[in-house]
Image (cartoon, rainbow, N blue to C red):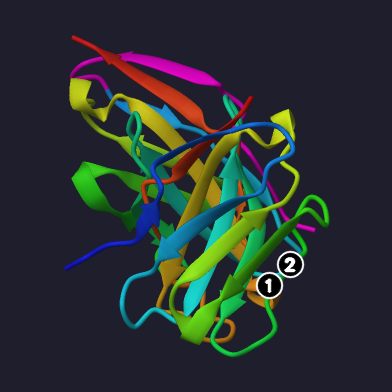
Amino acid sequence: GAGVSQSPSNKVTEKGKDVELRCDPISGHTALYWYRQSLGQGLEFLIYFQGNSAPDKSGLPSDRFSAERTGGSVSTLTIQRTQQEDSAVYLCASSLGGQGVPDTQYFGPGTRLTVL
Amino acid sequence: AQSVAQPEDQVNVAEGNPLTVKCTYSVSGNPYLFWYVQYPNRGLQFLLKYITGDNLVKGSYGFEAEFNKSQTSFHLKKPSALVSDSALYFCAVRDYTNAGKSTFGDGTTLTVKP
């Protein structure tokens, strides 16, 4: 079946511009996660959505970052007034979800963001 | 707070030899531990997980990992390495109180030479 998809696969933008990154989770998955992977670094947690619950935004690095999930499916990560340090690969993952369930996350291929 | 350490940035082994990629963790409650592999320009792929039960967990592509509570470790192992196993490996931990938020290690690059 279809996995997690992300678009665009690559995004080059100028410093100060806003960008939107999209994630389509696996159908039926109620949990959705965003991570950031900088060059040579591990994954940095950004935000977690579980069903209709309030998202866990504790990993967002600044108020320039925001995310929403419409209809419990597609999610958009928005970065306003991009800075060069925002350059990274942004990974989305989804899982079946459920409170307190440590289930397997399935990752998309990522969006490589380059801020010039 | 939860944390994961992968003490080796790089592991090199010869094809056919056993391999070990190390991972240690710290959580306040019961740990849920995961290994993922990332091939170049690809997303992460799930290898295996420990939730409860047997300390030796078997996963995809012949990999296994041993949970050691006293040493707070979850090392990834394979009896006989293949060149195609060369990739970046990540260990991750979650605890029950924060099931949505995974903490990942910085990754270990495995290189298997023919």
Q: In this figure, which residue is indicated by the disc labeled 1? A: B98
Instruction: Estimate how packed mark 2 is, as few (under 14), some (14 to 19) or many (20 or more) residues with alpha carbons within 10 Å.
Output: some
Mark 1–mark 2 contact, CB under 8 Å? no
Quadrant for the N terminus of chain A, please. Answer: bottom left
Residue at image x 51%, y 69%? A75
Going by the numbered disc 2, the residue's amino acid type is: Lys
Quadrant for the C terminus of chain A, please. Answer: top right
- Using the image as rendered, state which of residue B99 and residue A86 is in the foreground: A86
Q: In this figure, which residue is indicated by the disc labeled 2? A: A57
| Camera sees residue B71 | no
Residue at image x 72%, y 51%? A80
Mark 1 or 2: in front is: 2
**Regarding mark 1 in the picture, which secondary structure is present there?**
helix
Q: Position of residue B2 (x, y in %)?
A: 73, 56
Residue at image x 39%, y 23%? B110
Q: Position of residue B75 (x, y in %)?
A: 48, 41
**Regarding mark 2 in the picture, which secondary structure is present there?**
loop
State whether residue A114 is above or below residue A36.
above
State whether residue B94 is above or below residue A55.
above
Q: Position of residue A108 (x, y in %)?
A: 38, 53
Going by the numbered disc 1, the residue's amino acid type is: Asn
* Marker count (numbered): 2
Q: Which residues are magenta?
A: B1-17
Residue B79 in the figure: left or right of residue A53: left
| Camera sees residue B108 | yes
